Amino acid sequence: MRSVEKGLLARCVGVAIGLILAGGLAVSAQDLAPSASAPGPRKAPARFEVTVLRAALEPGGIDPDAARLHKLLARRGLSYGTLRVVAHQRDALMLGEIGSVMTPNGRAYRYRPLDRGETGFLVAVDWGTTRGDFRMVPGVPLILGGQPKDGSQLWVVLELR
Amino acid sequence: MISERLAQQLHAYHDGELTGLGRWWLERRIAGDPEARAELSRLRALGDALRAQAEQVPAPDLWGRIVLELPAARPQPGAVEQRGFGFTLPKWAGALVAAGAVAAAFFLMPGAPRGPVSPSGSSGSAVQLLDTGRRPALILQDDAEATIILLLPAQKIDAGRMSDAVG
């Protein structure tokens, strides 16, 4: 009698473990399936907007498209008298693809989405001898500047849309 | 007319970024494609001309004035790599914690993303790695509003220190 109870108990435990494992596998399969097949937002490209500007201390006017940068820089103690947009472009890049814009000092400013997060992208950027990896989210610009050009400076604003 | 993809590869080749098989493949392509050769020549000529022009025109007092106007942040020469921890753990402890975190993410949060990196942006700092070669750089701002990095010419470090000392 006791051996029968033991056998029943062992079967119940076995069934319970089996159900737990099967449930876990089902949940995992459900989670993995969308990323493996459906063309959802995980496959959407990274949409960039890049603006190249020339800045000088001498008065010359602030372009309307540069007003936001002017305000941000002024708050950091960099008050320019002239801020002109010299190039502007938009790109949609898949992971690993490279976007590029030639700046007036003859150097290419390049950007490449490396990885995707919940709200943004990990983006590699290089410009001349400067390079870096940045965690970018829409609406938060990456502003890199200081390259000299004809007595002025160049700034590049990279933003996720 | 060359394709956009080939143009990007030529840009990368021109900047010395292509290596290995990609470089070998592109050099073969350039050798057999007059349009690719012409585009590469154009890139080289444009780069040389603009660099020469930039070198010929000095900026006598721009940097001096800018350095004087900068906030009291210190220049950070060379590479800046932000790290999340101010202390060190034994390697096995790190591995144990990482394994525990992965296991927890897998079994307890089945809806969580499983990519190798999750740039969520919620922690505020955008700069993960910054290498400016031998140039110093100032990270003027790195928060939820913007990331602003100012590259300084190497010879201006002393000017900055002098202005700090005087100020």
Image (cartoon, helix red, strand yellow):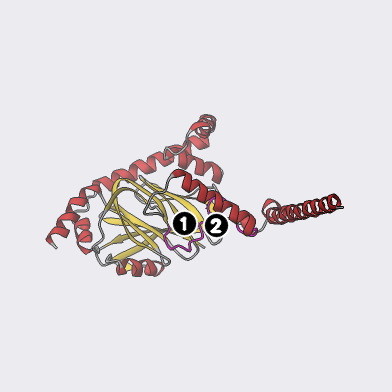
Magenta span contains residue B113? yes
Question: Dot 1: few (<14), some (14–19), or many (≥20) neighbours within 10 Å?
Answer: many
Same subunit under labels 2 and 1?
yes
Kindly check if marks 2 and 1 are in contact, taking CB atoms under 8 A apart as contact. yes
Report in which chain the residue with disc 1 lies.
A
Query: Taking A161 as reference, is B5 above or below it?
Result: above
Does the image show residue B145? yes
Q: Which residue occupies the foreground of this view, A78 or B90?
A: B90
User: Which residue occupies 71% across, 52% down?
Assistant: A37
Q: Which residue occupies the foreground of this view, B63 or A52?
A: B63
Give percent across and percent down for residue A15.
80, 53
Q: Which residue occupies the foreground of this view, B93 or A2?
A: A2
Mark 2 to mark 1: distance in Å? 9 Å
Q: Amino acid at mark 2?
A: Gly
Give percent across and percent down for residue B105.
59, 56
The residue that mark 1 highlights is A135
User: Which residue occupies 43% across, 39% down?
Assistant: B14
Magenta span contains residue A91? no
Report in which chain the residue with disc 2 lies.
A
The residue that mark 2 highlights is A117
- Say what secondary structure mark 2 lies in: loop
Residue numbers of the magenta segment: B109-126
- Say what secondary structure mark 1 lies in: strand
Give percent across and percent down for residue B137.
30, 53
